[in-house]
Amino acid sequence: MATKIFKHIQTSVVPLPIENIDTDQIIPARFLKATTREGFGNNLFRDWRFDENDNPKEDFVLNHPTFSGKVLVAGKNFGCGSSREHAAWAIADYGFDAVVSSFFADIFKGNALNNGLLPVQVSDDFLKKIFDAVYADHKAEIEIDLEKQLIIISATGEQESFEINPYKKACLINGYDDIDYILSKKELIQQFENSAL
Amino acid sequence: MGQTLFDKIWDAHVVSSNEGFPDILYIDTHFIHEVTSPQAFDGLRNRGLPVFRPKQTVATADHNVPTIDQHLPIKEELSRYQVDMLTKNCKEFGIELYGLGHPFQGIVHVIGPELGITRPGGTYVCGDSHTSTHGAFGAIAFGIGTSQVEQVMATQCLLQSRPKRMKIEVNGKLHKGVGAKDIILYIISQISAAGGTGYAVEYAGHTIRSLSMEGRMTICNMSIEMGARCGLIAPDETTIEYVKGREFAPKGEEWDKAVAYWKTLYSDADAQFDEVLSFKAEDIEPMITYGTNPGMGIGVTQHVPETASFEAKEQGSYKKALEYMGLHDDEQLLGKPIDYVFIGSCTNSRIEDLRQVAEFVKGKHKADNVTVWVVPGSKQVQEQAIREGLDKIFDAAGFPLREPGCSACLGMNEDKIPAGKYCVSTSNRNFEGRQGPNSRTFLASPLTAAASAITGKVTDIRTFLKEEELVS
């Protein structure tokens, strides 16, 4: 199965300036009972987005009429907690292509990359600049160029480079898949088993 | 230069290492459960691939299982479907399943160690972040996402970049009433829920060495709560004694060979860590969390911090957490009335936890305002507790012993804490809604949880210890 291809986007953003957003918030446990990868977007941030009667909470940003876009911008330590990949599926299924934060939890970062959802880690300063830009103008756009590893605030031209593992970058740009790569080394695995086990 | 324990194990499992690529790491045992595996099995079917090493894959049902009447069909339709799906998938792909009704069934991180599947020097993964538990044996063990579950099923390997290495030392003598859970809650409160991100953490020092295997598992279990990739503790006589004679532990010559190898598993004296932290056991009180991540913890007699003590950009998140918990600045949790006590989860549902709680509650009774759930980590723990008569002590105290599963740790089964209610929980996470929508969780040790159940409010276990010492 090929990974979704990611190269470059320019988009307005959805700001969520909360720190330590854990995967139980992104997709609560009671929605993990599905056995396919589809449809998790409906329950993205379920308990922040809807009240107990399933009415949208007006003050939550996903329900805000003027914020929209393909990138979620969140406070530091995004995606901590459970390893549930359903969190990455929910964010991608909702329609986001990337998440920007000043710090990501390891497992979430890996899960996102395996699903064509780009985690862009920026400095605390740059994160603040994005929030400032989007609160000044709700339609403010950012640009993410994966090939150049650059994130740019379109209105001000301010930019910052971001890190990504070169292998994972190639996977995203070309739609490669880890399993294909490992299976191409199957002989080495068998050699390892013969010598080590 | 010497090597760290982590590097010794990692290097022994690298199948292929190519510049610019993550390493291909060989996985000795892959644990699977019903929640994070169905999409991975589908992936294999779509690719037309078998499970590469089904005999190195161990399956159990834990997250969705009820904790009463396990002999009856699961009532909740989606839970039943997910558990049935695991049964069907395991059958189709030739994987041994310790499902409901099997004498080995239980929480995946409890059964691996108790069956002797988890051993020093091994590599273990599971689609569950608390896989870090198995590191207590001196092994590399970490949680993975479902795409990686599929990867391990397809290849018995995982593409992984080597994390940085951190050593956390704890030395000194613990106060009475302070245990492994307090140690780890204390460490996380000191370094934050992100303090270990990017690291494999080796716990060392005399205090850690003095812990039982159960205590060490509690410590490693919560490594993920500081963001660490995994936690591990060098194996020693305590480890070897624990593994010896267990169902799948090596026997005879194999055992001697294994033990000889395990004795080489330690960080060399001159091994370099990327970060070293030290804590004093004497500084640790019985701990309790007040907030909505496991880093928001305090000594049980301390007060909730003031919002103004945080940096301006953190204050919004902090206020949100206190509002969710129904707490205010400078509030003392001690004496706060509670509604539920949950003793269980992969952190604290082992026989030692149950014995400790039973010993404390013997001859006491829970307060009327509190509902108590004691959920063993596995069928074997449940049966052992019954053999030892712990169930009778629990019954008399109003602490009914239920059947094994993940239960109210995350409430994927019926065991949910109602909205607005306070629960003192021995589990690992206090996230918003973790134990049920709008539930409020105080994380604590089994002893603190048990004492709080008796008084009906957040309690300092040491007050009981003083009284009991006076009596005796």
Image: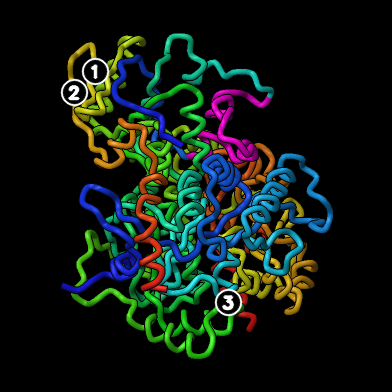
At x 68%, y 55%, the residue is: B91
Residue where numbered disc 2 is placed:
A159
Q: Of tags 3 and 2, which is closer to the observer? A: 3
Q: Which residues are magenta?
A: A23-52
Residue where numbered disc 1 is placed:
A153
Disc ID at residue B72: none
Q: Residues within 10 Å of mark 2 (few under 14, many from 20)?
A: some
Camera sees residue B306: no
The chain holding disc 3 is B
Q: CA distance from mark 3 to mark 1?
A: 57 Å
The reply to whether the magenta stretch includes residue B156 is no
Three-letter amino acid code at the position of disc 2: Gln
Q: Are marks 1 and 2 in contact (CB under 8 Å)?
A: yes
Q: Residues within 10 Å of mark 3 (few under 14, many from 20)?
A: some
Three-letter amino acid code at the position of disc 1: Ile
At x 44%, y 52%, the residue is: B225
Residue lying at the far left in this picture: please name it. B1
